[in-house]
């Protein structure tokens, strides 16, 4: 028996539920030297903006127990270069290409979403609601329910491709935010983004991150992420993409049982570049052992 | 696709106090160029989390060697591994040194030798090596370096061997007028000083830079350094840079 691993977001089919987490897999091509990209359910590329972005001053990363803190500052090559240099190569692979995007304000969010929506070879859009612009009211869109509702609504009504909203964990009730996304027409939600964090060198009394604080990722955040995914999956009917510290099939299966339709491998790519493949193979093996014919039979099937 | 594999440790010995040489047996057929690096990750434990980038010290047949100094948790754990243990290796990564066409100068400071040794060995009797250490106890591979290089000038800060002083002083007295391309690896103050010495001169100078890394393949953008063309990733656009590009 070969179990069915196929899942869907709206009408978009994924050959298996394993995708990559934005910012941890570059533009996909960086990992083609290790991984047959055709085997992935999908590739989520590094957060893209209309114009290239320099990112934050180094040092940008620091290792912490079972994880790391990063403050990349959404450095990216910008829409034009992505379309010219990366997408043509990505298109050659038989996998879903999902573009994670952001803007400096709502009109930029809309503008890049429109461009991505009309570009061939992009299968879905993932909207990162962590707006980096300190001077914009939209900086709060990830944590303010009203702004979130408006942002999702304005983007949704203009685009036709599947729209995924990437949620921030910095809220009291993440399932409320997910419900808002669903009500405003999002096709899926993905979570969690990194958790704000800090590390200090006691001799110099300086932060070890250039921007003083950064975002924590990796296995250190996994139990927090798992619980968030469980809460959200109970609250909404659209698919949930679960992520946060997944390093193995066992980790991924926990997210699926908690209610995730898809799972994303992030920071784990850094410690083992073939994690995605190991997770796909491990999920398939588990289904065979448990005689589960279809992955959908496992999604959200937590015994309570 | 054997850039990621498990290698078996043949030996892992302390050469001098906190300086170790680890020798791995690998089935990977990937050839490595001088100046390239691998990311070594001891085992399946998640703490310490990331692997550690180490310059290729030597690559021959199925053997890979790395020279490292214990600096923190990761290298400490590495130093505790034993013969027969398996270790995860990813590489070779990064751009190596542009290969020299004829004679060249090497300036190595302390453990910076790890990055240039393979270059010196690959071009026997072509390197004018300026090698600086704090004291003669820290000096490594003296006989071999003497054999492989065309000229070896050692500088010790305390004067316990060779010239007394910092290696850049010896270089500016004896090496600069040779007008040969320079390959350098060492602490930042050494690199800065080299930059100052050759400023305005038309001598090519390639330096290997160190930075904290996560992915090692250009994906995470965590290892960038400022250059005169904006941020560049040490792991893929380096670790070897033309000194003129760097903002020192
Ligand atoms: C270096 C790095 C860069 C990231 N960049 C982005 C990004 O551009 N956009 C985004 O939505 N999330 C970004 N993330 C967050 C990840 O996609 C993911 O949500 C988070 O790291 C948790 O998953 P993990 O623990 O498996 O990495 C980044 C994470 C890391 C570690
Ligand atoms: S270590 Fe990830 S980009 Fe260099």
Image (spheres, coloured by chain):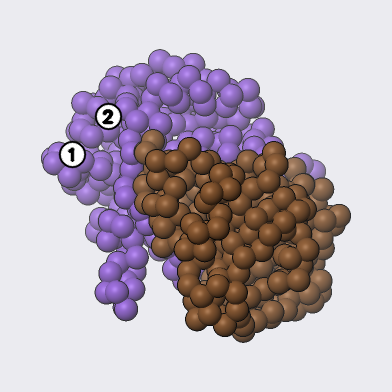
Chain colours: A purple, B brown
Please name whichever residue, A287 or B192, is drawn nearer the observer in this view of the structure: B192
Relative image position of residue A186 (x, y in whole percent): 35, 33
Q: Image check: B50 left or right of A125?
A: right
Spot occupied by residue A164 in the image (x, y as percentages of width and height): 39, 35
Q: Quadrant of the N terminus of chain B?
A: top right
The residue carrying pointer 2 sits among few (fewer than 14), some (14 to 19) or many (20 or more) residues within 10 Å by Cα, namely many
Q: Say which quarter of the image contains residue B244.
A: top left
- Quote the CA–CA distance across marks 2 and 1: 10 Å
Residue A109 marker: 2
Left or right of B188? Residue B175 is right
| Helix, strand or loop under label 2 | helix
Whether callout 2 and callout 1 share a subunit is answered yes
Indicate the secondary structure of the residue bearing disc 1: helix
Tell me if residue A27 comes above or below residue A291 in the rendering.
above
Give me the residue at 32% from left, 71% from top.
A200
- Across and down, in percent, residue A42 comes to 56, 35
The foreground one among B25 and A197 is B25
Give the vertical position of B147 relative to A12 (above or below).
below
**Disc 1 CB within 8 Å of nearest ligand 1 atom:** no
| Disc 2 and disc 1 in contact, CB within 8 angstroms | yes
A197 lies left or right of B198: left
Is residue B25 shown above or below B137?
above
Q: Is residue A233 above or below residue B162?
A: above
Instruction: Specify the farthest residue to the right.
Output: B61
Which of A109 and B130 lies nearest the eye of the viewer? B130
User: Label 1: which residue?
Assistant: A138
Cβ of mark 2 under 8 Å from ligand 1: the answer is no
Label 1 crowd bin: few (<14), some (14–19), many (20+), radius 10 Å: many
Q: Residue at x 34, y 73 (%)?
A: A201
């Amino acid at each position: 028996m070969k179990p069915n691993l196929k899942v869907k977001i709206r009408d978009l089919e994924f050959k298996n539920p394993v995708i990559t987490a934005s910012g941890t897999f570059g533009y996909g091509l960086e990992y083609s030297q290790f991984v047959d990209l055709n085997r992935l359910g999908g590739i989520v590329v590094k957060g893209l903006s209309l114009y290239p972005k320099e990112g934050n001053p180094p040092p940008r990363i620091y290792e912490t127990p079972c994880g790391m803190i990063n403050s990349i500052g959404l450095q990216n090559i910008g829409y034009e270069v992505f379309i010219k240099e990366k997408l043509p190569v990505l298109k050659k692979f038989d996998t879903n290409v999902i573009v994670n995007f952001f803007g400096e304000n709502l009109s930029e969010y809309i503008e890049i979403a429109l461009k991505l929506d009309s570009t061939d070879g992009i299968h879905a859009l993932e909207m990162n609601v962590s707006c980096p612009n300190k001077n914009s009211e939209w900086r709060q869109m990830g944590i303010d329910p009203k702004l979130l509702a408006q942002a999702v609504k304005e983007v949704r009504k203009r685009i036709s491709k599947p729209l995924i909203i990437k949620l921030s964990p910095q809220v009291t009730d993440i399932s409320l935010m997910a419900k808002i996304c669903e009500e405003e027409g999002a096709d899926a939600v993905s979570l969690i983004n990194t958790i704000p964090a800090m590390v200090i060198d006691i001799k110099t009394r300086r932060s070890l991150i250039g921007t003083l604080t950064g975002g924590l990722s990796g296995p250190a955040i996994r139990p927090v992420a798992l619980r968030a995914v469980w809460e959200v999956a109970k609250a909404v009917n659209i698919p949930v993409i679960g992520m946060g510290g997944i390093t193995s099939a066992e980790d991924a299966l926990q997210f699926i049982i908690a209610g995730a339709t898809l799972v994303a491998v992030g920071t784990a790519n850094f410690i083992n570049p073939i994690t995605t493949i190991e997770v796909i193979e491990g999920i398939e093996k588990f289904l065979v052992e448990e005689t589960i014919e279809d992955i959908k039979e496992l999604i959200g099937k937590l015994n309570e | 696709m054997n850039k990621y594999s498990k290698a078996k440790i043949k030996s892992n010995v302390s050469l001098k106090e906190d300086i170790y040489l680890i020798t791995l047996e690998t089935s990977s057929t990937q050839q490595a160029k001088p100046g390239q690096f691998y990311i070594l990750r001891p085992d399946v434990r998640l703490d310490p989390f990331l692997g550690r980038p180490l310059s290729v010290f030597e690559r021959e047949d199925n053997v890979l060697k790395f020279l490292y100094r214990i600096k923190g948790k990761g290298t400490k754990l590495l130093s505790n591994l034993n013969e027969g243990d398996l270790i995860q290796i990813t590489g070779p990564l990064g751009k190596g040194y542009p290969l020299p066409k004829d004679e060249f100068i090497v300036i190595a400071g302390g453990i910076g030798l790890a990055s240039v040794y393979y270059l010196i060995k690959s071009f026997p009797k072509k390197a004018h090596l300026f090698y600086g250490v704090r004291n003669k106890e820290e000096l490594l591979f003296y006989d071999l370096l003497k054999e492989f290089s065309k000229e070896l000038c050692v500088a010790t800060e305390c004067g316990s061997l060779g010239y007394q002083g910092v290696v850049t002083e010896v270089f500016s007295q004896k090496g600069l007028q040779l007008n040969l391309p320079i390959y350098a690896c060492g602490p930042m103050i050494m690199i800065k000083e080299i930059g100052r010495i050759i400023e305005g001169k038309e001598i090519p100078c390639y330096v290997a830079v160190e930075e904290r890394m996560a992915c090692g393949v250009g994906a995470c953008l965590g290892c960038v350094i400022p250059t005169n063309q904006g941020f560049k990733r040490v792991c893929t656009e380096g670790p070897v840079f033309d000194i003129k590009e760097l903002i020192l």
